Image: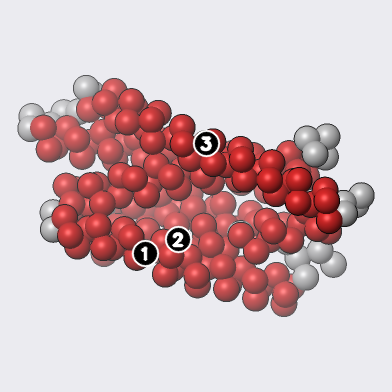
Amino acid sequence: MWRKQGIRLLCIIFMMDFFCYSYMVVILPTYLAKAAGMAASAAGLLAAAAFPAIGILGSMAGGILMSATGKRKPILAAGQALKLAGVLVLTLFLEQSLPAGIAGIIIFAVGNGMWMPVMYTIPMEMDGMDDNRVGAAFAFMSSCGFLMGFISPILGGGLTNIMMGMAPGQTTVLCHVFGLKWSLFLFGFTNIAALLCALRIEETGK
């Protein structure tokens, strides 16, 4: 499977997605509660509901656009760009405006759902692929993605501690917010790697 460039690129996209998404899901309730002053229960509910609910809309939009245009690559790339934009909006504006932070979460969730229908379609349209090879490709990509999802919170926790040591704040809470903010900000740039892969992948649609 690794010999096919399209599979390699999709695998990297999947890995970068899980790397950023898994860390974001883990820290988001704490980040919302401490940076925006939300009640812990409300922050947890928002974080738990936002990605599935908004992700459904993103997936529907991706599927509709794919069917309407017959294209795969633009939707794949748009999803990665939206995820990057969502992380940047969330981290740069949450402390000034909770609605802006929520908007960032929504943008990320839409992008995270939008590219999924395309990801499951492209391998089936590649030359030389049959049922067995498509199944093997999905197994390979999923395994790599889940591995990154396991690693990312561990690395993110270490990065948060490093960033906390650089925080200008005097209280533990402010230092923690600083660490969470900038670690998530840096994690968001994994979506640039995913975007570059999406731009390089061969169009398999009509």
Q: In percent of the image, x 52 and y 36: which residue is there?
A: 148
* Structural distance between the alpha carbons of marks 1 and 2: 7 Å
Question: Which quadrant holds residue 63?
Answer: bottom right
Q: In percent of the image, x 39 and y 42: which residue is there?
A: 23
Give the amino acid type for the residue marked by disc 2 in the picture. Ala
Q: Is residue 108 visible?
A: yes
Vertical relation: 6 (above or below) 96: above
Q: In percent of the image, x 49 and y 53: which residue is there?
A: 83
Give the class, few, some or many, for how many residues have Cα within 10 Å of label 2's Cα (few <14, many ≥20). many
Secondary structure found at label 2: helix
**Residue 93 placement (x, y as % from top left):** 28, 52
Report the quarter where the N terminus lies: top right
**Which residue is denoted by mark 3 in the rendering?**
148
Secondary structure found at label 1: helix
Vertical relation: 58 (above or below) 68: above
Position of 146 compared to 44: left or right? right
Give the amino acid type for the residue marked by disc 3 in the picture. Met
Residue sitting at the far front: 132
**Which residue is denoted by mark 1 in the rendering?**
50
Report the quarter where the C terminus lies: bottom right
**Residue 173 placement (x, y as % from top left):** 12, 38
